[in-house]
Image (cartoon, rainbow, N blue to C red):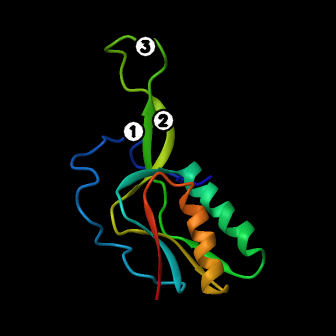
Amino acid sequence: MLIPKKVKHRKWHKGRARNIRHATDKIELAFGPFGLKAMTGSWISSQEIEAGRRVLTRYIKKGGKVWIRVFPDKPVTVKGNETPMGAGKGAVDHYVAVVKPGTIIYEMDGIPADQAKIALQSAAYKLSSVCKFISK
């Protein structure tokens, strides 16, 4: 799974106005002719990204190449069960990638368009965001 090697701050704030604004970065295909674009904003965990990557690599066997355009660098904390109020912030549980609408998550190259569409739609089932297949 993907996790940062080193972080400046171990615990982050959640932030404001999540999933409202459209993406301004990673909105066009840069590496391959096929991609998977997020239509809704969400937090995509490192487990979801890895599950989608596994689907893609198993589908293309040794024929193509896959690029992951998002990286989970935001820590999410969870408090233990039956912890009283005022016991502080919980420990870091997992990492997520903040995905805004319009962000490209995966790109592919080296296989025909019909196979790429099936593979990317299969990977989209693993993600918590509604996604769409795009091509150049």
Task: In this rendered view, identify the residue nearer to me: 58 or 125.
Answer: 125
Amino acid type, callout 1: Lys
Query: Label 2 near label 1: C-beta < 8 Å?
Result: yes
In the picture provided, is 17 more to the left or to the right than 37?
left
Quarter of the view holding residue 61: bottom right
Outermost residue toward the right?
62
Amino acid type, callout 2: Val
In the picture provided, is 7 more to the left or to the right than 88?
right
| Local SS, label 1 | loop
| Local SS, label 3 | loop
Which callout, 2 or 3, points to the residue nearer the camera? 3
Query: Label 3 near label 1: C-beta < 8 Å?
Result: no
Which residue position holds label 3?
83
For image coordinates 51% across by 55% down, the residue present is 127
For image coordinates 52% across by 53% down, the residue present is 4
Of the image marks 1 and 3, the number of the one nearer the N terminus: 1
> Percent position (x, y) of residue 80?
48, 20
Q: Which mark is residue 92?
A: 2
Of the image marks 1 and 2, the number of the one nearer the N terminus: 1
> Percent position (x, y) of residue 65?
66, 79
Query: Label 3 near label 2: C-beta < 8 Å?
Result: no
Q: CA distance from mark 2 to mark 3?
A: 15 Å
Quarter of the view holding residue 14: top left
Crowd tier of the residue under label 1, counting other residues whose Cα lies within 10 Å: few below 14, some 14–19, many 20 or above = some
Which residue position holds label 1?
11
Of the image marks 2 and 3, the number of the one nearer the N terminus: 3
Q: Vertically, is 24 above or below 114?
A: above
Q: CA distance from mark 1 to mark 3?
A: 18 Å
